[in-house]
Amino acid sequence: MNTQMGDALRKSLDEVDLRHKVTMIIEIVFSLTFASVVVLTVLRAHDTRTLLAYGLVGIAIIVAGSTIQVARLSHDNTRRILKAIEMLSQSKEH
């Protein structure tokens, strides 16, 4: 019974690691996409006000997206780890 719970704990932690890696890949893809949009905007913009407006909107999007992503990941990972610990503690009681 102990090895089964240990395996369940390991599986939960592996899922957390996998989710972290996938999230990093998605963030890299979005960052590259955003960077290419910024470059195209800079090349096409003809005045400073347009550049400033696009820059502020871009920064706001990055900050909001990052905040939401961090909060979601933290919540999901905490829930998975606590579930694995609960399973492990239940196995020790039996």
Image (cartoon, rainbow, N blue to C red):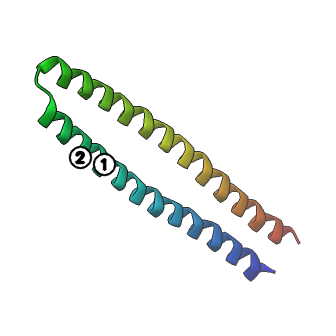
**Residue 56 image offset from top left, x and y in percent:** 28, 24
The residue lying at 70 percent from left, 63 percent from top is: 84
- Numbered disc 1: secondary structure: helix
Left or right of residue 73, residue 24 in this image: left
Q: Are marks 2 and 1 in contact (CB under 8 Å)?
A: yes
Residue sitting at the far right: 94
Label 1, residues with CA under 10 Å away: few <14, some 14-19, many ≥20: few
Whole-angstrom CA distance, mark 2 to mark 1, is 5 Å
Q: Quadrant of the C terminus?
A: bottom right
Q: Residue 80's image quarter?
A: bottom right
The residue lying at 86 percent from left, 68 percent from top is: 93
Left or right of residue 43, residue 76 in this image: right
Indicate whether 26 appears above or below 70: below
Indicate whether 5 appears above or below 63: below
Q: Quadrant of the N terminus?
A: bottom right
Q: Amino acid at mark 1?
A: Thr
Left or right of residue 20, residue 25 in this image: left
Residue 33 is tagged as: 1
**Residue 32 image offset from top left, x and y in percent:** 28, 51
Q: Residue 13's image quarter?
A: bottom right
The residue lying at 64 percent from left, 58 percent from top is: 81
Residue bearing the label numbered 2: 36
**Residue 10 image offset from top left, x and y in percent:** 62, 73
